[in-house]
Amino acid sequence: MSIRALSTDLQKLAETEINEVSSRVEKDILHIRSWLKYQPHLNVRPGDQWILHFLRGCKFSLEKTKQKIECYYTFRTLIPEFFQNRDPLQSEIQDVLKYGCFWLPLPKPESLDVPRVLYLSTEFLSCIEVSVSNIMKVNFMILDMLMNEDDHFIIAGNQFFNDFNGITINQITQVTPTFIKKCSVSFRDAYPLRSKQVHFINIPNVIETILKPFFGGKHLQRMKIHSSLCLEDLHKVLPKFILPKEFGGEAGTVQELKDKWRKKIESNREWFLNDEKYRSDESKRIGKPKKISDVFGIEGSFRKLEFD
């Protein structure tokens, strides 16, 4: 069985936080593999490590893991605007990478008490016309890279900071209830993430209004709305080691971090091209094939946002 060894501290955290039992990991992975044999519609990325990510993100609940894997690969078929045609060298993706309009992973914290932080800034969107669907496509590419490489990200959890300063009216009109539902359901139901908090900064009122209904229960409690980014408050919860210089930190500049992750995504081009084949084939599903309306309601049933 080929899985990455954890540091002693991260292994202890996995045992206390997500119910990981080293002696049972192999058995749990084999259980999921056995279940997959009876899911002819799912073409799942091979490798024990990949399955282990889902087990960890679901705190080793076998049933939740099955549901998460089912959604992860089904959504790759049902939502092509997010999960297909992910060649990093495509012009549409290059525009997003060039201007850094994606969830930018800040450096990995030294302490396991601090979740991995991802920061999205839309300040350059006023300079270009980028579709919000392509921004989300790159965001999910970032999540896939972190899932594939960073055990801290899965086990210790994560925080998201989304700063909407710079978003244009044209882009706001693309943020329909259908779009938000696809984003929120994909994020919540498909990805094995342990998100501690999701922060929204400078968020337009119209987006905030349609956003909240899609966050319920513990997810709504974890959502934080800020009128601006206060560095003093930020320094209380995040170490300066992981913060860019623009935020009073020591991690280099935001542009340096953006360039680093742009190169990382581009250098993994073959991984993304190969990943295209891993998804559901609804013609092989036992029972009724799933359609987009089965998961997200009737496509196009929402009117676009209107402005006076």
Image: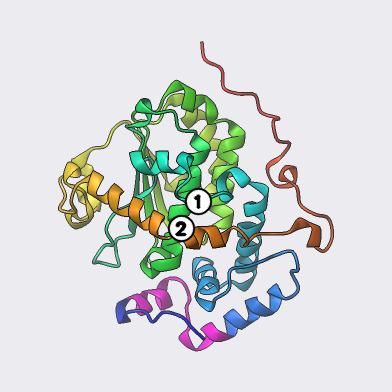
The disc at residue 269 is 2
Q: Is residue 31 left or right of residue 49?
A: right
Quarter of the view holding residue 305: top right
The amino acid at mark 1 is Asp
Q: Is residue 134 visible?
A: yes
> Tag 1, which secondary structure?
loop
Return the x and y of residue 140 as percentages of the image width and height: 49, 51
The residue that mark 1 highlights is 87
Return the x and y of residue 258 as percentages of the image width and height: 30, 47
The amino acid at mark 2 is Arg
Pick the residue in front: 19 or 34.
34
Q: Which residue is situated farthest in the top direction here?
A: 308
Q: Is residue 289 left or right of residue 239?
A: right
* Discs 2, 1 touching: Cβ within 8 Å: yes
Pick the residue in front: 307 or 9.
307
The residue segment tinted magenta is 10-26
Return the x and y of residue 119 as percentages of the image width and height: 34, 46
Name the residue at 34% across, 75% down: 10
Name the residue at 60% across, 62% down: 68
Q: Which is more N-terminal, label 1 or label 2?
A: 1
Pick the residue in front: 40 or 87.
87
Name the residue at 19% across, 46% down: 253
Q: Which residue is situated farthest in the right direction here?
A: 287
